[in-house]
Image (spheres, rainbow, N blue to C red):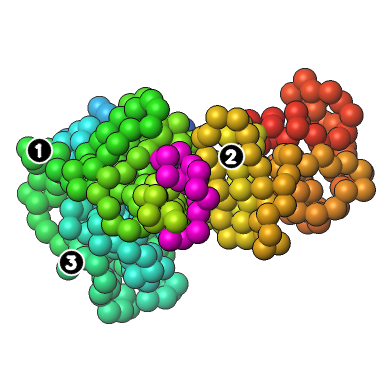
């Protein structure tokens, strides 16, 4: 069957003039955006008896999956069962396949309907590891031969059909983004569905299956608690009822032991990092005393107590993570060349080991002012919203002006100096 997918970009399309078997309409994007033409397009297609679909454009780099599922459901709720739900996966955060899996799982668990994921074959399906998604969710794939205009579903210039890496097959192919159909003069995405109208309608409905057993939750508990890697390892932590981005196994000791000690407050702080910076990796969390000794850890290491994590946030410097941890009031913070140590100890400890030897520091929120230079200045300039061309690591008059404006807006002391108070507001707002 042949069809199209449309959005506000086709706001003036008259679907009654268009030959198509199905119409897929953009519904939402991110956690708040609704396509202004969704209801117009979907209702027109419905009146014309077209097979329906609706899609959500994901923004994993900015939001939590449950927030975006909620936005999608808020808009398409009354149409559930009448169209196929799709997840449009092509933003700058498309490397985060775990986020996509969570979005798909959450939608499925809340509706009983399995959504279909859309992506490009080369820049996405081949580029990232989809082994944890492909067995459970169907694929709508995009591949264009060129940018030449194609007319009325003539696929003679479509090129070879896509060959996915992780999926055995796909239900639909978006083969051009510059299709032209009689009745509309603009560009259209044209799609080929490999099935009948009966099969399309089946994909709109609940499958009647139980939620997938591999996706389980464990609510974060206060204090340090013991977990079993074998029994609990595949479970995701939830925080106040919302799904976190961390499985219990991620905190396990590298020696393969079953018992894991995890402080609930550490999980919460790591999720804060994930919400702020995106993909967050735990290099080392709990360590058994024997393993801690083997890797040269301190005898009283917070890792042995289940209260520490050596953490990497993708595309974020360890210094910026340390500064954010300082603004959050973490107990222990250690800065290294490739990761940041954070822990939930009572009291405070700070150290900077980038030079190869420990150097004590009182705080990572270094005071900067007119004339200051360095990485901290660049970080401040980004948080102040200074244009990319102006981020030079030099605290000049423009940076001071932006600082004064920020301090005024947030009712801080207006001195043009970024100290602990201003840093904390910049980093945590």
- Of labels 2 and 3, earlier in sequence is 3
Region in magenta: 294-311
Q: Distance between the residues labelled 2 and 1?
A: 43 Å
Please report the residue visible at 9 percent of the width from the left and 55 percent of the height from the top: 196
Q: Residue 403 falls in which quadrant of the image?
A: top right
* Residue 273 percent across, percent down from the top left: 52, 41
Quickly name the residue at label 2. 332
Q: Distance between the residues labelled 2 and 3?
A: 49 Å
Q: Looking at the image, which is closer to me, 424 or 161?
A: 424
**Which is in the foreground here, disc 2 or disc 3?**
2
| Circles 1, 3 touching at the beta carbon (< 8 Å) | no
Q: Residue 171 falls in which quadrant of the image?
A: bottom left
Q: Looking at the image, which is closer to me, 228 or 408?
A: 228
Quickly name the residue at label 1. 210
| Circles 2, 1 touching at the beta carbon (< 8 Å) | no
Can see residue 27?
no
Can see residue 368?
yes
Question: Which quadrant is the N terminus positioned in?
Answer: bottom left
- Of labels 2 and 1, earlier in sequence is 1
Q: Residue 53 falls in which quadrant of the image?
A: top left
Please tell me how crowded label 2 is: few (under 14), some (14-19), or many (20+) other residues with Cα within 10 Å. Answer: many
Please report the residue visible at 67 percent of the width from the left and 63 percent of the height from the top: 356
């Amino acid at each position: 069957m042949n069809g199209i997918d449309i959005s506000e970009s086709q706001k003036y399309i008259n679907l009654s003039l268009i030959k198509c078997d199905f119409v897929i309409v953009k519904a939402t994007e991110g956690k708040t955006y609704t396509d202004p033409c969704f209801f117009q397009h979907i209702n027109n297609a419905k009146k014309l008896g077209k097979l329906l679909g609706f899609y959500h454009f994901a923004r994993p780099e900015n939001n939590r999956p449950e927030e975006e599922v909620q936005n999608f459901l808020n808009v398409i709720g009354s149409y559930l069962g009448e169209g196929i739900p799709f997840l449009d996966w092509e933003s700058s955060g498309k490397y985060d396949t775990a986020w996509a899996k969570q979005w798909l799982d959450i939608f499925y668990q809340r509706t009983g309907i399995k959504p279909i994921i859309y992506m490009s074959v080369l820049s996405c399906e081949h580029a990232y590891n989809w082994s944890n998604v492909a067995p459970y969710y169907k694929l709508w794939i995009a591949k264009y031969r060129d940018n030449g205009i194609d007319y009325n579903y003539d696929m003679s210039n479509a090129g070879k059909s896509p060959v996915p890496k992780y999926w055995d097959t796909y239900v639909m192919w978006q083969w051009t983004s510059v299709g032209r159909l009689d009745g509309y003069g603009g560009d259209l995405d044209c799609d080929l569905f490999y099935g009948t109208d009966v099969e399309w309608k089946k994909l709109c409905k609940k499958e009647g299956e139980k939620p997938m057993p591999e996706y389980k939750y464990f609510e974060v508990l206060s204090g340090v608690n013991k977990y079993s890697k074998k029994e609990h390892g595949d479970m995701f932590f939830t925080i106040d009822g919302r799904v976190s981005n961390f499985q219990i196994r991620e905190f396990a000791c590298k020696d393969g032991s079953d018992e894991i000690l995890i402080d609930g407050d550490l999980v919460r702080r790591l999720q804060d990092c994930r919400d702020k910076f995106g993909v967050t990796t735990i290099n080392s969390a709990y360590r058994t005393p024997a393993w801690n000794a083997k890797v040269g850890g301190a005898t009283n290491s917070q890792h042995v107590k289940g209260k520490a994590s050596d953490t990497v946030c993708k595309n974020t410097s360890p210094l910026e993570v340390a500064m954010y941890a300082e603004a959050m009031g973490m107990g222990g913070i250690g800065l290294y060349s490739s990761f940041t140590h954070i822990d939930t100890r009572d009291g405070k400890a700070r150290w900077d080991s980038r030079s190869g030897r420990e150097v004590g520091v009182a705080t990572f929120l270094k005071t900067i002012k007119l004339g200051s230079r360095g990485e901290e200045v660049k970080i401040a300039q980004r948080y102040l919203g200074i244009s990319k061309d102006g981020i030079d690591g030099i605290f000049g008059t423009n940076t001071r002006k932006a600082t004064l404006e920020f301090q005024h807006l947030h009712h801080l002391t207006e001195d043009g100096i970024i100290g602990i108070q201003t840093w904390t507001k910049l980093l945590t707002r």
